[in-house]
Amino acid sequence: MRVCSLTWGKCGLGSRMEVYVAKPRFTLSARRRICRVFQNCPSRRQTHSEKSRIVNLAANNNDNLSPGYVVYEDGAPSRVLLIYYIDDNTGAHDATARIQIGGGDGVAVSPLTQVRVKYFSAPSVSFKGNMTWAGQTLGNHFESDGRLQGSEVIETIQCQNNICPIPLKAPSLALVFLTDAALANSSPASSATASFETSVLTRIRHTATVDQE
């Protein structure tokens, strides 16, 4: 296994990039298309922090279609990232990954009773819009006003005998939070500002009134 620090461009370490706040005119007229690189920034940003170390799990004999990574913080595992590239939305190739912390090479098993999971999904691996992160989406092509739509969905997976089964649809990505602290550190603070008020409007729609008398 190789331990490394990982940087993902402008969405990575040291970055505080958030989904942009739309100008008011976007909600009044033309919608925009959000590129797929930007759409997955929230999932990338929540995967690791400035102090993370990431280990390639070499899952499934280093299978390129189902890679897995564990994220360490302060020397302890905090998250597991599972990616499933199989492109089949019929459900015939859905899979289940089973996570256990420790238990190999003489390492003691860490007790796990439950984990929390956020899923990143899209209609296919090649589709460039309508991607969903934890139940929220920026919309399909030319449907976005720059704000996430929908309510956040965080799945709770119960573990048995310290083994946690993580369902994976084909295709999808699962970010597994091993501790409550890891989930809290990846979530916006309760005091965070969701949007910003403005007194300036552009491209205001005009109306006319015709006197009928």
Image (cartoon, rainbow, N blue to C red):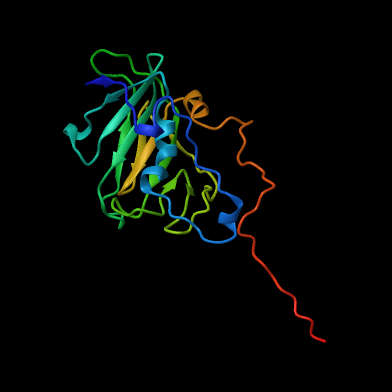
Image coordinates for residue 141, horizontal then vertical, percent: 42, 58
Q: Residue furthest left?
A: 61
Task: Choose top left, top right, bottom left or bottom right for residue 133.
Answer: top left
Please name the residue shown 43% across and 32% down the image.
45
Image coordinates for residue 67, horizontal then vertical, percent: 25, 35
Picture layout, residue 99 above or below residue 141: above
Tell me the quarter of the image containing the N terminus: top left
Task: Choose top left, top right, bottom left or bottom right for residue 47.
Answer: top left
Picture layout, residue 12 above or below residue 174: above
Please name the residue shown 52% across and 32% down the image.
187
Task: Choose top left, top right, bottom left or bottom right for residue 119.
Answer: top left
Q: Is residue 181 visible?
A: yes
Image coordinates for residue 158, horizontal then vertical, percent: 44, 34
Q: Nearer the viewer, residue 96 or 175?
A: 175
Image coordinates for residue 146, horizontal then vertical, percent: 51, 49
Task: Tell me if 106 is positioned left or right of 139 in this view.
Answer: left
Picture layout, residue 184 above or below residue 106: below
Task: Tell me if 39 is positioned left or right of 63 in this view.
Answer: right
Please name the residue shown 62% across and 55% down the image.
202
Q: Residue furthest right?
A: 213
Q: Is residue 159 visible?
A: no
Q: Nearer the viewer, residue 62 or 161?
A: 62
- Please count the marks in the image: 0
Please name the residue shown 37% across and 38% down the image.
174
Tell me the quarter of the image containing the C terminus: bottom right
